[in-house]
Image (spheres, helix red, strand yellow):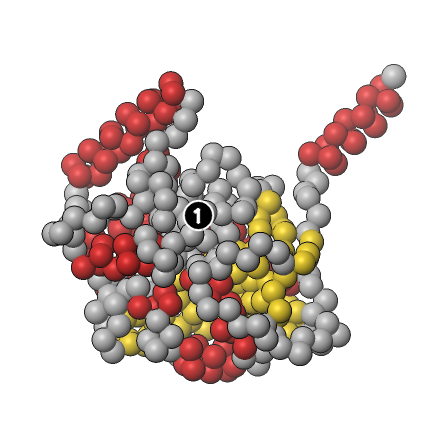
Amino acid sequence: MLRALIVTLTILCVASASFAADSIEEFTDDTRVFNIDKNITIKKAHFHNKFGIDLTGDLYLPANFDASKKYAALAVAGPFGAVKEQVSGLYAQEMAKFGYVALAFDPSFTGESGGVARDVADPSINTEDFSAAVDFLSVQDFVDPEKIGIIGVCGWGGIGLNAAAADTRIKASVISTMYDMSRVSAKGYFDASDSEEARFNTKKAINDQRTKDYKAGTYAKAGGVVDPLPEDAPQFVKDYYAYYKTPRGYHKRSVNSNEGWTLSSMIAMFNLPMLTFVEEIRSAVLIVHGENAHSRYMGEDTFKRLKGDNKELVIVPGASHCDLYDNMEKIPFAKIVSFFNEYLK
């Protein structure tokens, strides 16, 4: 009886520690919002993070892809509140044109990836999502595990650097139009709400909402990009609207295009600050920002903290924050490619 019980418990323990099998499948139901390059093959990828959440990505393969070769590879995510059919897919497709295997993925709780409740953000889980994408890439026969980099856009720029500070397998990082989500959540834009009183009021409102959510059995949403757009909206809000709420970038699964993040999830962003050890990143980092981006100060301040001669900052003349989402005349892909060519060679 005792032996049978031990065997049963062992089986249960093994089962509880197992994950869904990774897979690469044919790509169907194309809902991407950017111009598609028919020369680039795309596959559907399924993998998991260490929390057991199943993640879904689009795997972009170079023209004349040869599975017997070893390619440099990139994990791509962002912007914060977007899905892989938007900006990250565009970046991944462009990098595939230059010979890289690129995985654009949906973070936990968003898009086609798993996780309940939906549209929840968490700095720890989202940082892990990047490392999970590296897990997946590193075990593919056609990927050189010593040549893996990441591209993080907007809020996923800060999250990507947070991953690079912890994950030594990430050999190079391109951070485009960066947000530090911990900073902007805790202090407001341009640190205008950086006070204990302001944070207390925010925490009180969020925790009051948690009680309401628990009673209702649902999670209230923040609303996504404001719609209709007020006439006196700041220019960067107008820029967000022009991307997320119009045919240019709207997607049915995008958090920002629709109801937004759950209100109660935002408290984690400033209660668990990211980039604590960004100074200790030894791998190469390229931070790209638009000259006119409202978020530029976050990228520049983060760059000042980086150390080593393998760190670069590029300011794109005349570019706004959202120009680096999909403006092919503004996104410095030539520089991005040369950076990865140097550090993933």
Q: Is residue 217 placed above or below 43 in the rendered structure?
A: above
| The C terminus sits in image quarter | bottom right
Q: Residue at x 26, y 33 (%)?
A: 203
| Residue 179 visible | no
Q: Is disc 1 placed on a helix, strand or loop? A: loop
Q: Position of residue 338 (x, y in %)?
A: 46, 82
- Going by the image, does 92 lie left or right of 240? right
Question: Badge 1: how crowded within 10 Å, few (<14), some, or many (20+)?
Answer: few
| Residue 209 visible | yes
Q: Is residue 70 placed above or below 178 in the rendered structure?
A: below
- Going by the image, does 213 lie left or right of 19? left
Number of callouts in the render?
1
- Going by the image, does 298 lie left or right of 256? left
Q: Is residue 53 placed above or below 140 in the rendered structure?
A: above
Inspect the image, locate mark 1, and give the three-letter code of the amino acid beneath it: Lys
Q: Residue at x 34, y 78 (%)?
A: 329
- In the image as oriented, which residue stretches furthest toward the front? 247
Q: Residue at x 86, y 22 (%)?
A: 4
Q: Position of residue 25 (x, y in %)?
A: 68, 56
Q: Residue at x 42, y 77 (%)?
A: 333
Q: Position of residue 214 (x, y in %)?
A: 39, 22
Q: Which residue is mark 1?
A: 252
- Going by the image, does 116 lie left or right of 270? right
